[in-house]
């Protein structure tokens, strides 16, 4: 009798094991496991569902952003031994003003320069006058003076080190901090950057 009961129990257990598990999934479950925006994070965990293609994302599927300095360089030329702004240089002055006006978090560095003729003391003073002439014009148009700084050609800075030769000019270097999404690098990234540069 005891053996019969054990045999019946074993048969029931084996029959239960023989049944196939229910592996069907609901439409909702299938959608949760998809990655609709292709950022590597499944929909169920993705809090940012429209991530731009090719960007770096965090564990929640949201874009990683970085701050970069956008730089614009504009040159204002002067006559020899003069610091007044020529009529043909008004357009350059306008361009400096318009960029600063449109980007209220941008700042400008005015790098005064001269041709190599003349004494060092004279050229230093002339370079300062040229930068100051531009500064006064910008302030008169409403640009905050605190957003304007000055350097001279003889000062060793990251900007002046890139000046290839002396000339009768003032170089306006405008820096505008902006944010952009970080690009995810792959084996084709360099090719895309080169191709983009060719098209610009």
Image (spheres, rainbow, N blue to C red):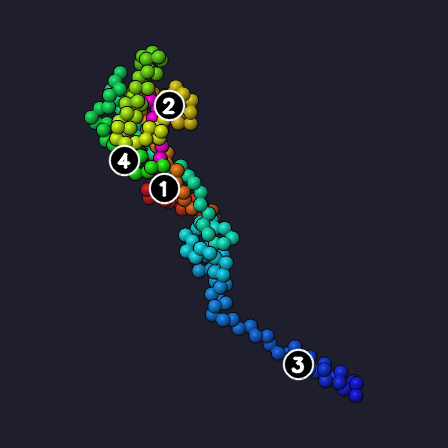
Question: Around disc 4, counting alpha carbons within 10 Å, would you say few (fewer than 14), some (14 to 19), or many (20 or more)?
Answer: few
Q: Nearer the viewer, residue 106 or 119?
A: 106
User: In this image, 134 relative to 6: left or right?
Assistant: left
**Viewer can see residue 191:** no
Q: Could you say whether the residue bearing mark 1 is in a helix, strand or loop? A: helix
The residue carrying mark 2 is 151
Depicted 51 relative to depicted 14: above or below: above
In primary-sequence order, the first of circles 4 and 2 is: 4
Furthest-right residue in this view: 2
Mark pair 2, 3: CA separation: 89 Å
Residue 85 sits in quarter: top left
Q: Nearer the viewer, mark 2 or mark 1?
A: 2
Residue at position x 28%, y 23% in the image: 133
In primary-sequence order, the first of circles 1 and 3 is: 3
| Residue 197 - label | 1
Q: Position of residue 36 (x, y in %)?
A: 44, 60
| Residue 15 - label | 3
Q: Nearer the viewer, mark 4 or mark 3?
A: 4
The residue carrying mark 4 is 98
Q: Nearer the viewer, residue 141 or 88?
A: 141
Q: Which residues are magenta?
A: 106-113
Q: Position of residue 94 (x, y in %)?
A: 25, 32
In primary-sequence order, the first of circles 2 and 1 is: 2
In primary-sequence order, the first of circles 2 and 3 is: 3
Question: Around disc 3, counting alpha carbons within 10 Å, would you say few (fewer than 14), some (14 to 19), or many (20 or more)?
Answer: few
Residue at position x 47%, y 70% in the image: 27
User: In this image, 149 relative to 89: left or right?
Assistant: right
């Amino acid at each position: 009798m005891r053996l019969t009961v054990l045999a019946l129990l074993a048969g029931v257990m084996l029959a239960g094991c023989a049944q196939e598990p229910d592996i069907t999934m609901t439409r909702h479950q299938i959608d949760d496991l998809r990655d609709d925006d292709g950022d590597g994070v499944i929909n169920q965990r993705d809090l940012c569902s429209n991530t731009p293609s090719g960007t770096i994302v965090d564990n929640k599927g949201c874009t990683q952003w970085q701050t970069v300095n956008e730089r614009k360089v504009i040159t204002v030329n002067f006559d020899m031994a003069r610091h007044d702004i020529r009529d043909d240089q008004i357009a350059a002055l306008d361009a400096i003003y318009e960029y600063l006006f449109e980007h209220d978090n941008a700042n400008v560095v005015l790098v005064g320069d001269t041709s190599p003729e003349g004494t060092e003391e004279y050229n230093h003073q002339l370079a300062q006058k040229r930068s100051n002439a531009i500064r006064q014009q910008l302030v008169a148009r409403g640009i905050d003076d605190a957003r304007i700084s000055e350097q001279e050609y003889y000062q060793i800075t990251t900007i002046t080190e890139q000046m290839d030769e002396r000339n009768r000019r003032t170089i306006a270097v405008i820096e505008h901090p902006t944010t952009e999404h970080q690009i995810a690098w792959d084996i084709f990234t360099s090719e895309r950057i080169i191709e983009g540069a060719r098209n610009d």
